[in-house]
Image (spheres, helix red, strand yellow):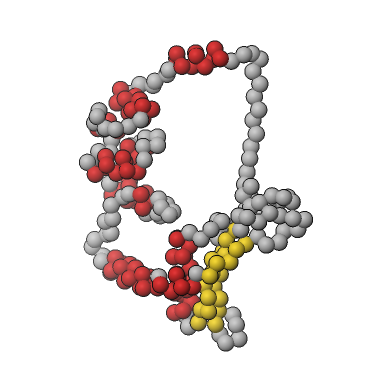
Amino acid sequence: MEENGSVSLYEVKSFTSVKEIYLHDVSIQYYVLSNLGFRVKSANVVHIDSSYIRGEELEKLFCIVDVTAEVEALQGQILQRLELFERYLADREHEPDIDIGSHCNKPYECDAKHYCWKVQRNIPDYSIFNIFNLGSKKQKALYEQGIIDIADIPDDFEMTAKQRQAVENYKAQTTHIDKEAIQAFLEMLTYPVYYLDFETFQQAIPRWKGIKPFM
């Protein structure tokens, strides 16, 4: 806080750029401080500088981005959302009924996802949403047709060969083992066979000289 009573707001993130969701995070902090009587001089997002290379000592690791204008422009949206929340809370007879979709997981998984999926709509533990790499657009297309059970997927629905095989296995309740492909692979090997297994990890703060964040 400065002598004139104004404050500067800094929201620290571990990512390497300013994401749109971060602006909403900062806008809420701005709204709260403003309504507590503080004059917010500036609003900033502090994020990791991906171009930084560590020297002997850890020095300039962060970038500070002034997002005051963007945050101030979002204040009207906060008021609208608060009014919407108040209407939801005031209705003691009808619970919110927002259909499921990609918004259940983006930008973060919703805390109410289990309730909306399992309680409201009885989505089973294994459904069209579990088909490997099916994609949200195709999942949505099936869901909008009222298809949730994998067994109900039409035979002419567009999928990859692997996805089609998985669906056929599910419908037939069988396990598919391509013995010929396995045998062909094994015949390519020359014994003795050696294996090299190693693990990697990424750190936001570079530990050694010459290393970048998350390198």
Q: Residue at x 39, y 21 (%)?
A: 175
Relative to the observer, which residue lies in front, 179 or 99? 179
Q: Is residue 125 visible?
A: no
Q: Residue at x 28, y 59 (%)?
A: 96
| 146 on left or right of 77 | left
The location of residue 195, given as percent across then percent down, is 64, 24
Q: Looking at the image, which residue sits at the far right?
A: 56
| 9 on left or right of 90 | right
Relative to the observer, which residue lies in front, 76 or 170? 76
The location of residue 22, given as percent across then percent down, is 48, 62
The vertical placement of 39 against 73, above or below, is: below
The location of residue 140, given as percent across then percent down, is 29, 44
| 63 on left or right of 129 | right
Q: Residue at x 25, y 28 (%)?
A: 155
Q: Residue at x 28, y 55 (%)?
A: 98
Can you tell which quarter of the image residue 157 is in?
Answer: top left
Can you tell which quarter of the image residue 137 is in?
Answer: top left
Q: Looking at the image, which residue sits at the far bottom?
A: 4
